[in-house]
């Protein structure tokens, strides 16, 4: 893969698309005072190089009656590289796990988990997550309210 560092125009494109991925090449060109063709080429290059990994619709979880978000901190009992990789592979299979981070501090991983309610979360913990090998200490934090939700990276 070619090594590429985005210039300011690429960064501007990325900033705009993170806020509104429905912008057309023509609209991007007008905002950035460029022609459509170079914008299209730049976006395609950013996609090819993995700077743009997906174009998705963000859904507001508050619009659903039954949507509980939890952060689950996990400490493994064995800290080998193999066990870390195996854990990451296994939790990635659970549709309830939205995000998985290998972290520093008192826990090895932090997971963002979504469930319909406390009963569903408990079922996930016992019947799915609890079946994984090498699980030590767990700490669950339930989200009460969300003060900020931003998906755009400052580029």
Image (cartoon, rainbow, N blue to C red):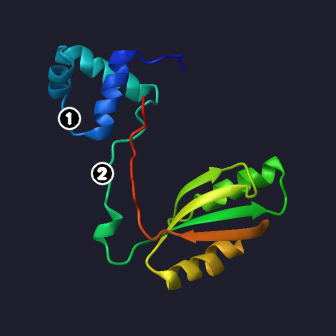
- Classify mark 2: helix, strand or loop: loop
- Quarter where residue 130 is shown: bottom right
Q: How many neighbours does mark 1 have within 10 angstroms: few (below 14), some (14-19), or many (20 or more)? A: few
Task: Please rate how many residues cluster around mark 2, counting C-alpha atoms within 10 Å: few if below 14, some from 14 to 19, many from 20.
Answer: few
Q: Kindly give the residue lying farthest to the front in the view shown.
A: 147
Q: To which residue does mark 2 refer? A: 57
Could you tell me residue 5's position as x and y percent? Answer: 48, 17
Q: Is residue 45 above or below residue 146?
A: above
Q: Nearer the viewer, residue 47 or 122?
A: 122
Horizontal and vertical percent for residue 61? 35, 65
Image marks 2 and 1: residues in contact by CB distance under 8 Å: no
At horizontal 32% and vertical 24% (from top left) the residue drawn is 12
- Give left or right: position of 16 versus 76: left
Determine whether 7 is above or below 58 in the image: above
Q: Which residue is mark 1?
A: 23
Is residue 133 among the parts visible in the rendering?
no
Give the answer, above or below, for where 76 lies relative to 104: below
Is residue 148 or residue 87 the one in the foreground? 148
Label 2 to label 1, Cα distance in Å? 13 Å
Most distant residue in the bottom direction: 119
Instruction: Please identify the quadrant where the N terminus is shown.
Output: top right
Placement of the C terminus among the 4 image quadrants: top left
Relative horizontal placement of residue 35, taking residue 121 as reference (left or right): left
- What residue do we see at 45% from left, 71% from top? 144
The structure residue drawn at horizontal position 39% and vertical position 53%, both measured from the top left corner, is 149
């Amino acid at each position: 893969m070619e090594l590429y560092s985005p210039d300011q125009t690429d960064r501007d494109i990325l900033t705009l698309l993170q806020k509104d991925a429905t912008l057309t090449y023509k609209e991007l060109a007008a905002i950035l005072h460029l022609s459509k063709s170079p914008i299209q080429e730049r976006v395609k290059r950013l996609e090819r190089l993995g700077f743009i990994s997906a174009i998705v619709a963000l859904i507001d979880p508050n619009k659903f009656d039954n949507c509980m978000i939890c952060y689950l901190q996990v400490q493994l009992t064995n800290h080998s590289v193999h066990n870390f990789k195996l854990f990451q592979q296994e939790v990635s299979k659970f549709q309830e796990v939205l995000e998985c981070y290998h972290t520093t501090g008192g826990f090895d991983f932090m997971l963002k988990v979504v469930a319909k309610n406390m009963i569903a979360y408990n079922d996930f913990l016992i019947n799915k997550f609890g079946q994984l090998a090498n699980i030590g200490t767990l700490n669950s934090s339930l989200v009460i309210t969300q003060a900020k939700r931003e998906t755009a990276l400052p580029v």
